[in-house]
Structure formats: C-alpha cells, structure tokens
Image (cartoon, grey):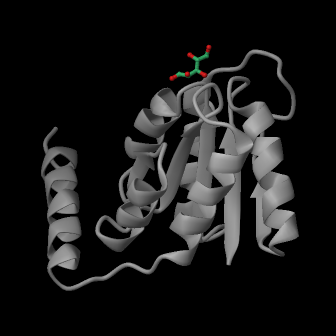
Amino acid sequence: MVVGLASDHGGYLLKEDIKNHLEERKIQYIDLGTYSEESVDYPEFGEKAAEAILSGKCDYAIVFCGTGIGISIAANKVPGIRCAVVSDVFSAKMSKAHNNVNILALGGRVIGKGLASEIVDAWLDTEFIGGRHERRVQKIHEVENKYLNKK
Ligand code: RB5
C-alpha cells in the first residue's frame, strides 16, 4: 500500500507528524508537498493528491490544511474521489467501512498528532464493507456523472 500525502501551509506540520507515524508503521508514502510553512493555495494540493490516486501512483491519500475543509472540497471536485474531513476515530472507521473514502482530510489547526495518528490508523486498518454500501457509493458517482455529462 502506498499513501500520498499533501498539504498547504496550515496542514504542513501535521503532515510531517503523520509522515513519522507512517514510517514507524512501515507504511510507504509519497510526499506531494507542500514542503514548508510558506503560504500556498490548498486547491493545488488537493488536486495533486487526487491525481496521484487516479494515476495509480498511490492507493490512498491523506490531505491536510488548517481545517481540512478547503483541501477536501478541492479533492472532491476530481471525479472518482471520495474525500472526507474527519476529527474522530469513529467517523474515520465509518468513512472507510461505509463510504470507501479514498482520501482522508485532517485539520492541522483542529487536531493534534496523537489523535491524528489514531484517526489515520483507524481509517487505514478498516475494510470497506461493500454490499448495500457499494450500491450507495455507486449512486454518488452516478450523481457525479450526471453533472459531468451536462455541458
Ligand atoms: C489557510 O489559511 C487556510 O484557509 C487553509 O489552510 C484551510 O483551513 C482552508 O480550508
């Protein structure tokens, strides 16, 4: 499993913490930037994470901004992406089990590294249940396709 990591300046420090955590767990990652606390625009990094998944470079991605909100909205604009902002362990598990989220978004100014690490573990270690949830996830993408095909 390869995990892509991308952040703006507001999520940069938490991204660095999660890199250390993934290294401890021996999980392979690709750091897609940003590489300092210098101000950047989160949509570019949400797109980079989404693109890394669509190209097959990564299996999953974790994105970070100040709240997790802006970068998750940006990532969700890319067809095929299901990105959720999560601040608790229960939602992290459900986001995989029921929604098969392929990008997890975390707020660097919202949660600390301890909770963030537990959230990442819960999300990575949970399997998608499928069944009726597969049907619902398909319906999400039917909505996406309906509006994509409308010019
Ligand atoms: C940047 O100041 C901040 O707006 C950004 O990190 C994020 O929180 C946006 O949703």
Q: Is residue 5 left or right of residue 61?
A: right
Q: Is residue 72 left or right of residue 26?
A: left
**Which residue lies most toward the bottom here?**
131
**Which residue lies most toward the top here?**
39
Q: Establish if 29 lies above or below 116.
A: below
| Image location of residue 64, percent across then percent down | 62, 38
Q: Is residue 42 left or right of residue 100?
A: right
Q: How many discs appear?
A: 0
For the point 14% across and 79% down, which residue is it?
132
For the point 62% across and 58% down, which residue is it?
118
| Image location of residue 122, percent across then percent down | 54, 66
| Image location of residue 103, percent across then percent down | 50, 55
For the point 71% across and 20% down, which residue is it?
40
Quadrant housing residue 4: bottom right
- Could you say which is closer to the camera, residue 150 or residue 4? 4
- Could you say which is closer to the camera, residue 74 or residue 115? 115
Whether residue 81 can be seen here: no
Quadrant of picture, ligand 1: top right
- Could you say which is closer to the camera, residue 55 or residue 136? 136
Q: Establish if 151 lies above or below 32.
A: above
Q: Establish if 129 lies above or below 90.
A: below
Name the quadrant of the N terminus. Answer: bottom right
| Image location of residue 3, percent across then percent down | 68, 64
Name the quadrant of the C terminus. Answer: top left
For the point 77% across and 73% down, which residue is it?
27
Quadrant housing residue 76: top left
- Could you say which is closer to the camera, residue 96 or residue 63? 96
Whether residue 111 can be seen here: yes
